[in-house]
Amino acid sequence: MPSTGGSRILEGYLSPFNVTAVKRAKELGAIVVGKTNLDEFGMGSTTKDSAFQVTANPWDLSRVPGGSSGGSAPAVFARQCVVSLGSDTVTDAGILLYAIAGNDRFNATSSN
């Protein structure tokens, strides 16, 4: 799947590998059904700054859907998926944390 970071700069970019969190979740049987919207490069607080579209709050269109990774929570709320990764998503965090916890050798900020 293309990975854009919510930016037209990366439109069509295909990563040569999965991030460690996705790799670990898939090893435990998770099925990736898609990617969600976010503010460009996660630099925002409403998901209104994505280069592709504005994400709607599925429960109240007058409110923002979430923070910089605001596509994650609405996907869960709208029952499009059971869990979703995002920098500000807490739904079913315990289950997801168990799946992705541990050192990430590709991330210089990850601890042993």
Image: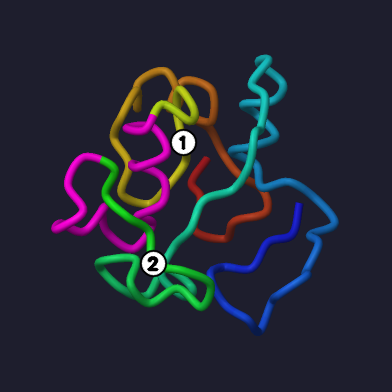
Q: Nearer the viewer, residue 85 or 64?
A: 64
> How many numbered markers are drawn?
2
Residue 44, percent from left and from top: 31, 73
Under mark 2, the amino acid is: Val
Residue furthest to the bottom: 9
| Residue 67 marker | none
Density class for disc 2 (Cα within 10 Å; few <14, some 14-19, many ≥20) is some
Q: Main secondary structure of the magenta part?
A: loop
Residue 61 belongs to magenta span: yes
Vertical position of residue 12 compared to residue 109: above or below = below
Residue underneath mark 2 = 54
Secondary structure of the residue carrying tag 2 is: loop
Amino acid type of the residue tagged 1 in the rendering: Ser
Residue 105 drawn at (x, y percent): 67, 48
Q: Is residue 2 above or below residue 19?
A: below
Residue 10 vs 26, above or below: the answer is below
Q: In front: 72, or 93?
A: 72
Is 62 within the magenta? yes
**Looking at the image, is mark 2 or mark 1 earlier in the sequence?**
2
Q: Which residues are magenta?
A: 59-78
Along the viewing direction, whichever of 55 and 68 lies nearer the viewer: 55
Provide the residue designation for mark 1.
84
